[in-house]
Amino acid sequence: MNEQRIKKTFEIETSPAVMERFERFLALLHYNSAFGHSSTFAMALDGDGADKVVISPRPRFKNEVDVTGGIGGDVEIALDDGYMAKRISNLGSDWFVGPAAALYKNGEIQKVIPKNLRK
């Protein structure tokens, strides 16, 4: 990898529940970029409710985020040069990965990592 790399530190203040969700989001970024999985990653956040997040130093792009929030998409996506809002649709099944790295399809376990955890 010959590209330039930078390191930047942020401080995040939020509730314990949102912090755990944020750490799960960071895990998506960290592990998927480590083994080459490309996707769009998202994290649920209820800005009208208790899911308040304070980041220091304050991130740039306030005005762009303000405009993006008014589009009405289900997912707001940060891009290299701006933002995009998209609607999301169902995959035809309700997929969920639980804390034990268990993949559920319509409430039924399909896969567990490591495999010896499967019931």
Image (spheres, rainbow, N blue to C red):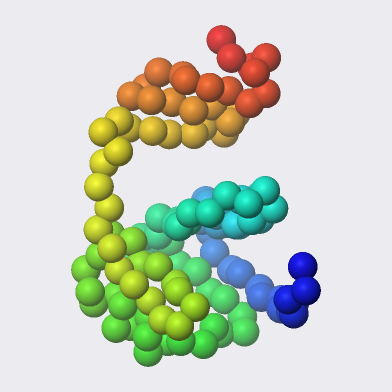
Q: Who's the residue at 42% across and 87% down the image? A: 62
Q: Who's the residue at 39% across and 33% down the image? A: 95
Among the 4 quarters of the image, the one containing residue 107? top left
Q: Nearer the viewer, residue 1 or 63?
A: 1
Q: Who's the residue at 53% across and 74% down the image? A: 54
- x and y percent of residue 10 in the render? 66, 75
Q: Nearer the viewer, residue 9 or 82?
A: 82
- Observer able to see residue 27: no
- x and y percent of residue 16 in the render? 57, 54
Q: Nearer the viewer, residue 4 or 73?
A: 4
Residue reaching furthest to the right: 2
Q: Who's the residue at 56% across and 85% down the image? A: 58
Q: Is residue 72 placed above or below 28 in the rendered structure?
A: below
- x and y percent of residue 66 in the render? 33, 83
Q: Is residue 29 placed above or below 69 in the rendered structure?
A: above
Q: Quadrant of the N terminus?
A: bottom right
Q: Is residue 110 left or right of residue 116?
A: left
Q: Quadrant of the C terminus?
A: top right
Q: Nearer the viewer, residue 23 or 82?
A: 82
Residue reaching furthest to the front: 2
- x and y percent of residue 12 in the render? 61, 69
The image shows a total of numbered marks equal to 0
Q: Is residue 25 placed above or below 67 in the rendered structure?
A: above
Q: Is residue 95 left or right of residue 23?
A: left
- Observer able to see residue 85: yes
